[in-house]
Image (cartoon, rainbow, N blue to C red):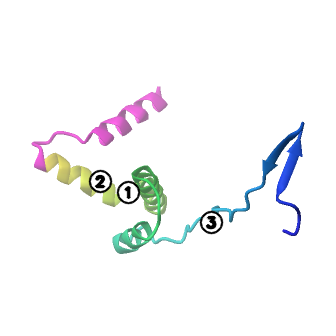
Amino acid sequence: MSQEHCYREDGVEWERVWTVPQAAVDANIDPFSQNAFVDKIGSQKGSLGDCFDRSAEMSAKRAEKRGGVDKVKEDYYAAYAKKRGNKKHPGQIKEQIGKINVEI
């Protein structure tokens, strides 16, 4: 850190920028606890896409621990279908199409 904060290459002077890496990942969220998920996501900076990605990770962990079935997601799909006259959720349709393509 005691070095000069400039870098020269081909006559061009570049200024060095010292930052703290943002590589810390907290993987210790209980996938079965809604409150733990909300608390963790609420205290982090990030986009809505980051929230969706973390939610998908938690779903995958729940499915892994329960033999391939995420009960929370299945309950959500059932409530969605009940509320909309047995119409399937678009995510559920996408998953079923993906399973068919894998089997073929």
**Residue 45 vs residue 30, the one in the foreground:** 45
User: How far is disc 2 from disc 3 in space, using C-alphas?
Assistant: 31 Å
Assign the N terminus to one quadrant of the image: bottom right
**Is 9 above or below relative to 2?**
above
What residue does disc 2 label? 74
Residue at position x 69%, y 62% from top? Answer: 19
Percent coordinates x, y for residue 77 in the rendering: 25, 50
Q: Label 2's element?
A: helix
Mark 2 crowdedness (10 Å alpha carbons): few <14, some 14-19, many ≥20: few
Local SS, label 3 = loop
Location of residue 80 with respect to 39 vertically, above or below: above
Label 1 Cα crowd, 10 Å radius (few <14 / some 14-19 / many 20+): some
Where is residue 27 shown, x and y percent of the image?
Answer: 55, 67
Q: Quick one: SS at disc 1? A: loop
The residue that label 1 is drawn on is: 70
Amino acid type indicated by mark 1? Asp
Seen in the picture, residue 41 relative to 76 is either above or below; the reply is below
